[in-house]
Image: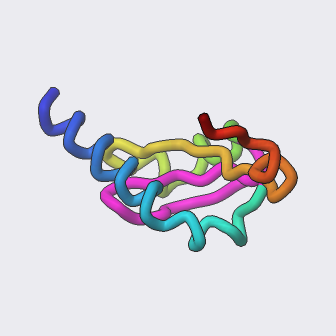
Amino acid sequence: MDNMAFKVNENHTWLATHGRVLDKYSGKWVAIDQSKLIASADTLKELDEMPQVKTARHPLFFLVPTEEETSSILIL
């Protein structure tokens, strides 16, 4: 269980530090595993069915917000 928690944290850290890399995936679902973006798709279902996602150890799925959605985020 500790090893899984490490991978999740590692993937979240990658996500937090590579925001600009995700700009070209605006509005798409992405999968991150072992600090690498491994796949992208229009829907979560499509992403989950991809071979590289099925064989990933602990993928993190993330819906990349569109520019419009990003500009609407309020941070308190």
Residue 57 x %, y %:
31, 46
Residue at the image position 13 percent from the left and 32 percent from the top: 2
Q: Image quadrant of residue 26?
A: bottom right
Q: Image quadrant of residue 44?
A: top right
Instruction: In this rendered view, identify the residue nearer to me: 76 or 72.
Output: 76
Q: What stretch is highlighted in magenta?
A: 27-43
Furthest toward the left, the residue is: 2
Colouring chosen for the image of the structure = rainbow
Residue 45 x %, y %:
69, 37
Q: Does residue 2 appear left or right of residue 62 in this picture?
A: left
Instruction: In this rendered view, identify the residue nearer to me: 18 or 49.
Output: 18
Q: Does residue 1 appear left or right of residue 22 in this picture?
A: left
Residue 47 x %, y %:
63, 47
Q: Is residue 33 magenta?
A: yes
Residue at the image position 48 percent from the left and 67 percent from the top: 18
Instruction: In this rendered view, identify the residue nearer to me: 40 or 11.
Output: 11
Vertical comparison of 72 with 33: above or below = above
Q: Does residue 15 appear left or right of residue 67 in this picture?
A: left
Residue at the image position 32 percent from the left and 41 percent from the top: 8
For the C terminus, which image quadrant? top right
Magenta residues, dominant SS class:
strand
Q: Image quadrant of residue 3?
A: top left
Residue at the image position 39 percent from the left and 59 percent from the top: 14
Q: Does residue 1 appear left or right of residue 48 in this picture?
A: left
Q: Does the magenta stretch include residue 30?
A: yes
Residue 60 x %, y %:
45, 43
For the N terminus, which image quadrant? top left
Q: Count all numbered tags in the image, as a single digit.
A: 0
